[in-house]
Image (cartoon, rainbow, N blue to C red):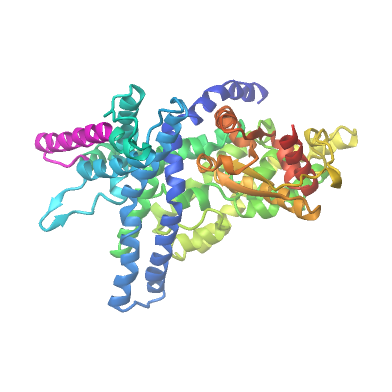
């Protein structure tokens, strides 16, 4: 096992390089920006469709109004995502461009929408078809969002622009500076769209769906599911946020499948598409990546080791809501040879059992998207439209996860008990060595002016734990310090609003980029180790001292 772990760890630089890929990050950031729209539309569909499970149908007029809210939000997702992905990619490109020669991200967003319409939307009598403006247009949206910023980069980097006299105001000059890349991008997609349709008889949006259809089918099979969810856990095991690497590559499949399932169920059919966001949230990752809910419960309630019992009890609430960094870094699970197999294999088993229920027992797959922090058993039941078999599957998965983790948990628990008896155990919850080095700030030394701290992680959930700890510490000591959390990528336009930006440990591979961005704007930045982070989230006073020490440094 130790040899296997060392082999996996040697691949960490490669994994980090993948996680830093600006195109994968652009998809992730674009999707994060659109999550409110997806959840908003899902609420209307829940209201419209769930009553039918109980044999109640809304009057046609009310049903039409409810579906209208869905069609004009989720039904426009392709357009929304082409804009948000293009903006994220533009922001990444701008970090490597001269400060006085930046790409106009607003112009890129507008042009990307135009190009997507040219590429994937067909004219019909009296208007245009909306079929590829929604989830069916996502693959086309990726193509457009990846290319348009690079077209702009080509012209802006070489300063190929319409030059105006110095007396012309900058905001007017910028309009003309954008004109050449805008025109070229639109012309390229206009001509390509016409030529492609003449050559193939299909719009590009329809063609690319057909090309990737075999991949969609393969990803939904047992082997494809094992690769996807096993990879997420494998990345996390070496301390890299797995979903941020894997999910961008399958986001289009996720969203297309949930939309297809909803349409199938609405037509009275059997929804069989497995690979969706809710499958990840409420089946594969019960209690977070690695399906750690039952492991955390065992640590909290039956562990003999003081360390595991303390970590488990402190982590059980966040893990219930799928925020499992406290148990991952606190147990720890990361790079722990004893827990490697259950951490990687349990998510795969969960998804395989779910697929068996769908394919062989007639259960519907997920048709609704709920917030990922919904406790998994509840999300499983509601997300499948209160399917009767979901009430069987939810407790069954909990039992299977407990069985998978139990023997490994007992071995690890026994190891820690022996170490504790020998006086060699470190109780991570009670002390975090790196935090001890931060000096305790006396009341008279607290800052007189207001300080703001931003904490970043992949989704904004783990970071909110430290942000809240800093805020509590400030309230307790009447310090003028405020702290908030964001997902990485959302911070780029607001860095200058903060005095310190802290990066959560699972995103440490992004620190060089963050540090560069912060230094360019005169803002302090820092990252932490997993153990240090866990300790800080549980001690508001130390969290505040940690932040103040960094700002004073």
Q: Is residue 541 magenta?
A: no
Residue found at x 31% / y 71%: 65
Residue 408 visible in this rendered orientation of the protein: yes
Question: Which quadrant of the rendered structure holds the C terminus?
Answer: top right
Q: Is residue 100 left or right of residue 109?
A: right
Quadrant hosting residue 117: top left
Task: Give the vertical position of 485 relative to 511 (above or below).
Answer: below
Q: Position of residue 253 (x, y in %)?
A: 37, 44
Question: Which quadrant of the rendered structure holds the N terminus?
Answer: top right
Residue 331 visible in this rendered orientation of the protein: no
- Closest to the observer, 4 or 522: 522
Residue closest to the far front:
167
Q: Position of residue 174 (x, y in %)?
A: 34, 36
- Closest to the observer, 94 or 405: 94
Task: Give the vertical position of 492 relative to 335 (above or below).
Answer: below
Q: Is residue 202 magenta?
A: yes
What's drawn in magenta, residue-wise?
Answer: 179-204
Q: Is residue 117 left or right of residue 471?
A: left
How many numbered dots are placed on residues in this image? 0
User: What type of secondary structure mainly makes up the magenta span?
Assistant: helix
Task: Give the vertical position of 439 relative to 100 (above or below).
Answer: below
Quadrant hosting residue 107: top left
- Closest to the observer, 193 or 234: 193
Q: Is residue 355 left or right of residue 452?
A: left
- Closest to the observer, 137 or 315: 137
Q: Is residue 279 left or right of residue 541?
A: left
Task: Give the vertical position of 117 relative to 195 (above or below).
Answer: below
Q: Position of residue 348 (x, y in %)?
A: 51, 42
Q: Position of residue 519 (x, y in %)?
A: 59, 29
């Amino acid at each position: 096992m130790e040899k296997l772990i060392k082999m996996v760890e040697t691949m960490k630089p490669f994994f980090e390089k993948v996680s830093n890929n600006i195109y994968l990050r652009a998809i992730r950031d674009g999707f994060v920006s659109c999550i409110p729209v997806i959840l908003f539309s899902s609420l209307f569909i829940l209201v419209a469709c769930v009553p039918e499970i109980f044999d109640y149908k809304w009057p046609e007029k009310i049903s039409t109004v409810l579906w209208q809210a869905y069609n004009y939000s989720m039904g426009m997702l392709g357009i929304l995502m082409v804009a948000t992905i293009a903006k994220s990619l533009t922001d990444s490109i701008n970090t490597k461009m001269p400060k006085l020669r930046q790409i106009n991200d607003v112009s890129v967003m507008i042009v990307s929408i135009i190009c997507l319409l040219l590429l994937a939307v067909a004219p019909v009598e009296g208007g245009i078809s909306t079929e590829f403006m929604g989830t069916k247009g996502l693959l086309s949206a990726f193509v457009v969002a990846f290319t348009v910023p690079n077209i702009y980069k080509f012209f802006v980097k070489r300063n190929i622009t319409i030059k105006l006299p110095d007396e012309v105001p900058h905001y007017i000059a910028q309009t003309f500076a954008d004109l050449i890349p805008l025109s070229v991008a639109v012309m390229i997609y206009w001509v390509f769209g016409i030529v492609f349709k003449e050559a193939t008889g299909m719009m590009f949006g329809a063609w690319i769906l057909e090309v990737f259809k075999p991949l969609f089918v393969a990803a939904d099979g047992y082997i494809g599911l094992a690769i996807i969810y096993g990879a997420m856990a494998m990345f996390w095991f070496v301390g890299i946020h797995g979903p941020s690497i894997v999910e961008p590559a399958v986001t289009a499949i996720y969203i297309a499948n949930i939309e297809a399932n909803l349409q199938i169920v609405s037509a009275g059919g059997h929804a069989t598409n497995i690979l969706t966001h809710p499958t990840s949230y409420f089946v594969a990752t019960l209690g977070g990546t690695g399906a750690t809910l039952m492991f955390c419960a065992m640590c909290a309630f039956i562990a003999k080791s003081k360390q595991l019992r303390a970590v488990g009890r402190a982590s059980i609430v966040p893990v219930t809501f799928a925020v499992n960094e406290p148990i991952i870094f606190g147990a720890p699970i990361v790079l722990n040879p004893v827990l490697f197999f259950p951490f990687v294999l349990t998510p795969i088993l969960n998804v395989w059992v779910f697929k068996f229920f769908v394919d062989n027992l007639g259960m519907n797959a997920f048709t609704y998207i709920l917030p990922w922090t919904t406790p998994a058993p509840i999300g499983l039941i509601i997300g499948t439209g209160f399917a009767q078999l979901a009430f069987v599957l939810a407790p069954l998965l909990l039992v299977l996860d407990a069985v998978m983790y139990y023997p490994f948990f007992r071995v690890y628990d026994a190891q820690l008990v022996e170490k504790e008896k020998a006086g060699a155990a470190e109780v991570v919850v009670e002390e975090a060595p790196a935090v001890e080095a931060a000096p305790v700030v006396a009341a008279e030394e607290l800052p007189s002016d207001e300080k703001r701290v931003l904490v970043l992680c992949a989704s904004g959930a783990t970071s909110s734990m430290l942000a809240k700890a800093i805020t509590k510490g400030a309230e307790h000591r009447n310090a003028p310090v405020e702290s908030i959390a964001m997902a990485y990528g959302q911070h780029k336009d607001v860095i200058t609003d903060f005095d310190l930006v802290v990066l959560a440990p699972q995103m440490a591979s992004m620190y060089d980029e963050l540090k560069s961005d912060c230094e360019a704007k005169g803002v302090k930045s820092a990252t932490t180790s997993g153990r240090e982070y866990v300790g800080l989230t549980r001690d508001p006073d130390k969290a505040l001292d940690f932040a103040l020490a960094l700002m004073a440094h």
